[in-house]
Image (tube, rainbow, N blue to C red):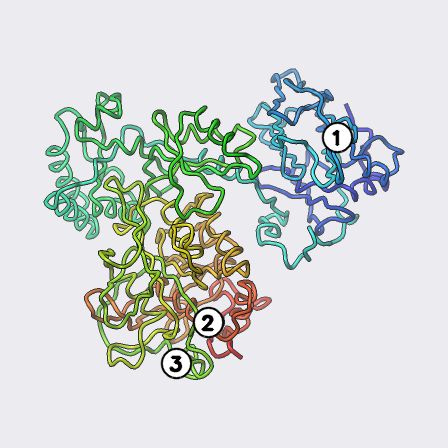
């Protein structure tokens, strides 16, 4: 079957005219990489940069009704249709779709025919009212080996083709109608695509320069990648996880002697004495678990890379050991495992490449904004979940716990529901520190002169600006630090999978790393101790979480949410003006949950009464591409690498995601125990950049987060031997920060 619009020489004038009135979101045609064809009112967002990705199957974007219809009249009538034209084996079967519930199109392999099932008539909705009558037609999905097609109209529906045999499904996710803002459907036909018919234009009132990095990023073929919806991103992330068969964690050590013994195991791993660590672990496992439960320690079998060894040491330091369990132990119920001294809070151990993830019975769920509390409660009950206190998570995120089953499978099931935007397990993982230890040495703060601080302080010291530093712990008694009244911490529960918010610094966990980060921003000046911070006049808001470097990303998201809006944890006052975090995997890869992403987006857009809060994050210290780190790759994050006193990049993370460098090698800063030391790491470069942002906001408080970011970019000194293309390069970003330039 062929399309009535098909013109194999390219899009006809009529088809283009109809396309110009389409208001759908992006159409994504997924080969191995995604290609996006934005389709917006009156013109396309930007030239698609289409290339023939598959010589035997070319795909074109089509919008329209029957030929001959006036485009304006059609747009006002809001009649839409989706056509997925089959190959030689297939044929399209138009059906009506009901937006009130998910509908599926089932394909029978080999027969080339997919028919929509469970479909019913439904009204379309136009811009002004819901009284107009229209027919909405959906064609079938066809067999497309290894090619996925997803169609979105206003972000509310999708056709997906999966697998070598083209198993297809169609989901309509909008509960109150397919159309929004008069959005028409689009047709996807086999044919060729003439990108020259489309010019750059605005998208939802924004100029191309104002669109997000996600919307403009190109893949290596030059084709524009489509922004995935959150369900797709979470599904892809969860689908790549591997269950480590038979590997289980111990219960968190609950005595001083046991914790000391596990710390000794961690010390052996740190010094690459993996076999010794494995032997110590076996002794501890035999003492804490019943006979027959343990087959072997898992340390030696899992410690196959530096990343893995770092994580295993962190788990051991937190009092958790990993072991190969017997079949009898694996088959035991959660209650039986608890009775045997096992870990009843973790159901499985999974791997995401080198990353180890301990699957808890907790999930983080985002529901559609139109879902009311009754509907949310009903959905949670349907899947055997009960709601939990969401604390300082961004509004709209719900934490839930399951009483049976595995959280990952439940997340997949939840995402079949139209009212769920995404659902993801709340994994327990290593949330480390991005530093490279160096010997304590000479007390000089060369970085101030390098960034022009002396003259910058004549203009601003950061007075009136609140800077949040999120880390594992701080020396709350350090004489060179003044902790502000909003400094608080998240006390982990005994099983480490949750945390309670504790206001104030009483019994806050210590840590030299967080102390040094805080000191880079706000160490006191003229007190006769050590040096001073970049923004010594600012107010320090220290937020501690995951003190053992083991925790969940939802706890990290809560810390970020509290920093930006303390009222989420019951503290009625304004939040931080600048946020800095130097936590994360120090290897190449770190996968970010959608919950943490929403917390970052919430901060960047909703902080400072809508002006946005700049969020600084330390890149990896290893010579790795930042693109493997989903947190620092986030467009809302200002990713900072480290520079030396000689203005070299010192081999930290690199790539297009790198924003800038700041001093972070052999910098003299406060550490635990009231002392000072010379330390190295991107961990300390990020708070240096955050301190410069505090100076800027103190002098110009009306600036938005985007304006602060632009000012920092333009202030950078172009250091190093590499050329800068359009103001930046992969090793230095926009250059090394200069505080004086940022204030001019």
Tell me if 388 is positioned left or right of 293 in this view: right
Q: Quadrant of the N terminus?
A: top right
Q: Earlier in the sequence, mark 3 or mark 2?
A: 3
Looking at the picture, how far across and down is residue 270, in whole percent?
Answer: 21, 51
Q: Nearer the viewer, mark 2 or mark 1?
A: 1
Gap in Å between the C-alphas at discs 3 and 2?
A: 13 Å
Q: Nearer the viewer, mark 1 or mark 3?
A: 1
Q: Which residue is mark 3?
A: 449
Q: Is residue 194 above or below residue 680?
A: above
Q: Crowdedness of circle 2 by 10 Å Cα count: few (<14), some, many (20+)?
A: many
Tell me if 21 is positioned left or right of 49 in this view: right
Q: Quadrant of residue 514?
A: bottom left
Looking at the picture, how far across and down is residue 32, in whole percent?
Answer: 57, 38
Gap in Å between the C-alphas at discs 1 and 3?
A: 64 Å
Q: How many numbered dots are placed on residues in this image?
A: 3
Q: Earlier in the sequence, mark 2 or mark 1?
A: 1
Contact between labelled residues 1 and 2, with CB atoms less than 8 Å apart: no
Look at the numbered disc 1 and give the secondary structure of its residue.
Answer: strand
Q: Is residue 648 visible?
A: yes
Q: Is residue 589 visible?
A: no
Q: Is residue 221 above or below residue 28?
A: below
Q: Earlier in the sequence, mark 1 or mark 3?
A: 1
Q: Crowdedness of circle 3 by 10 Å Cα count: few (<14), some, many (20+)?
A: few
Looking at the picture, how far across and down is residue 727, in whole percent?
Answer: 57, 68
Gap in Å between the C-alphas at discs 2 and 1?
A: 52 Å
Q: Is residue 158 above or below residue 586?
A: above
Q: Residue at x 73, y 27 (%)?
A: 123
Contact between labelled residues 3 and 1, with CB atoms less than 8 Å apart: no
Q: Which residue is mark 1?
A: 81
Q: Residue at x 27, y 28 (%)?
A: 246
Q: Which residue is mark 2?
A: 736
Q: Residue 155 or 150: which is nearer the viewer?
A: 155
């Amino acid at each position: 079957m062929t399309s009535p619009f098909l013109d194999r020489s390219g899009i006809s004038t009529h088809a283009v005219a109809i396309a110009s009135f389409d208001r759908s979101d992006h159409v994504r045609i997924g080969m191995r990489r995604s290609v996006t064809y934005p389709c917006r009112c009156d013109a396309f967002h930007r030239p698609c940069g289409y290339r023939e990705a598959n010589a035997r199957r070319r795909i074109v974007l089509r919008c329209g009704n029957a030929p001959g219809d006036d485009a304006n009249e059609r747009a006002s009538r809001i009649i839409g249709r989706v056509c997925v034209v089959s190959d030689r084996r297939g044929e399209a079967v138009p059906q009506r779709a009901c937006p009130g519930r998910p509908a599926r199109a089932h394909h029978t392999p080999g027969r080339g025919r997919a028919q929509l099932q469970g479909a019913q008539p439904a009204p379309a909705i136009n811009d002004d009212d819901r009284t107009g009558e229209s027919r909405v037609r959906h064609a079938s999905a066809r067999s497309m080996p290894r090619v996925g097609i997803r169609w979105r109209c206003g972000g509310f529906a999708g056709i997906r083709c999966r697998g070598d045999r083209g198993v297809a499904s169609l989901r309509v996710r909008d509960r109150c109608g397919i159309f929004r803002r008069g959005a028409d459907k689009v047709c996807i036909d086999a044919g060729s695509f003439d990108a020259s018919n489309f010019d750059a234009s605005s998208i939802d009132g924004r100029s191309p320069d104002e669109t997000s990095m996600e919307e403009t990023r190109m893949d290596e073929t030059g084709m524009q990648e489509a922004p995935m919806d959150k369900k797709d991103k979470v599904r892809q992330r969860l689908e790549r996880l591997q269950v480590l068969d038979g590997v289980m964690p111990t219960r968190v050590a609950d005595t001083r002697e046991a914790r000391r013994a596990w710390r000794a195991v961690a010390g052996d791993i740190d010094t690459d004495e993996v076999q010794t660590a494995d032997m110590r672990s076996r002794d501890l496992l035999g003492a804490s678990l019943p006979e027959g439960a343990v087959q072997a320690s898992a340390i030696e079998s899992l410690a196959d890379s530096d990343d893995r060894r770092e994580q295993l040491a962190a788990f051991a330091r937190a009092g958790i050991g990993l072991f190969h369990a017997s079949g009898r132990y694996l088959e035991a119920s959660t209650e039986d495992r608890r009775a045997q001294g096992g870990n009843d809070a973790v159901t499985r151990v999974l791997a995401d490449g080198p990353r180890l993830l301990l699957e808890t019975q907790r999930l983080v769920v985002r529901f559609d904004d139109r879902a009311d509390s009754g509907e949310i409660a009903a959905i949670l009950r349907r899947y055997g979940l009960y709601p939990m206190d969401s604390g300082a998570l961004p509004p709209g995120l719900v934490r839930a716990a399951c009483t049976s089953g595995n959280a990952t499978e439940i997340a997949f099931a939840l995402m079949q529901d139209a009212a769920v935007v995404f659902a993801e397990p709340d994994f327990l993982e290593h949330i480390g520190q991005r530093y490279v230890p160096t010997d304590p040495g000479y007390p000089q703060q060369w970085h101030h002169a390098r960034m022009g601080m002396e003259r910058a302080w004549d203009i601003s010291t950061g007075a009136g600006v609140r800077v949040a530093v999120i880390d594992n712990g701080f020396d709350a008694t350090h004489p060179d630090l003044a902790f502000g009244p909003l400094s608080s911490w998240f006390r982990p529960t005994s099983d480490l999978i949750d945390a309670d918010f504790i206001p104030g610094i009483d019994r806050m966990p210590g840590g030299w790393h967080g102390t040094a980060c805080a000191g880079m921003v706000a160490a006191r000046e003229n007190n006769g101790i050590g040096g001073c911070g970049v923004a010594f006049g600012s107010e320090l808001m220290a937020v501690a979480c995951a003190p053992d470097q083991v925790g969940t990303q939802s706890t990290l998201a809560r810390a970020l949410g509290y920093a930006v809006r303390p009222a989420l944890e019951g503290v009625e006052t304004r939040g931080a003006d600048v946020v800095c975090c130097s936590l994360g995997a120090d290897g190449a890869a770190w996968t970010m949950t959608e919950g943490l992403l929403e917390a970052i987006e919430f901060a960047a857009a909703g902080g400072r009464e809508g002006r946005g809060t700049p969020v600084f994050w330390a890149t990896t210290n290893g010579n790795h591409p930042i693109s493997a780190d989903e947190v620092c790759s986030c467009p809302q994050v200002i990713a900072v690498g480290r520079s030396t006193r000689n203005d070299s990049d010192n081999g930290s993370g690199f790539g297009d995601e790198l924003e800038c460098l700041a001093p972070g090698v052999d910098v003299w800063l406060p550490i635990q125990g009231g002392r000072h030391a010379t330390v190295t790491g991107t961990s300390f470069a990020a708070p240096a950049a955050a301190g410069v942002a505090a100076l800027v906001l103190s002098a110009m408080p009306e600036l938005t987060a985007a304006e602060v970011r632009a000012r920092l970019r333009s202030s950078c000194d172009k250091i190093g031997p590499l050329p800068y293309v359009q103001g930046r390069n992969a090793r230095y970003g926009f250059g090394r920060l200069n505080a004086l330039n940022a204030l001019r």
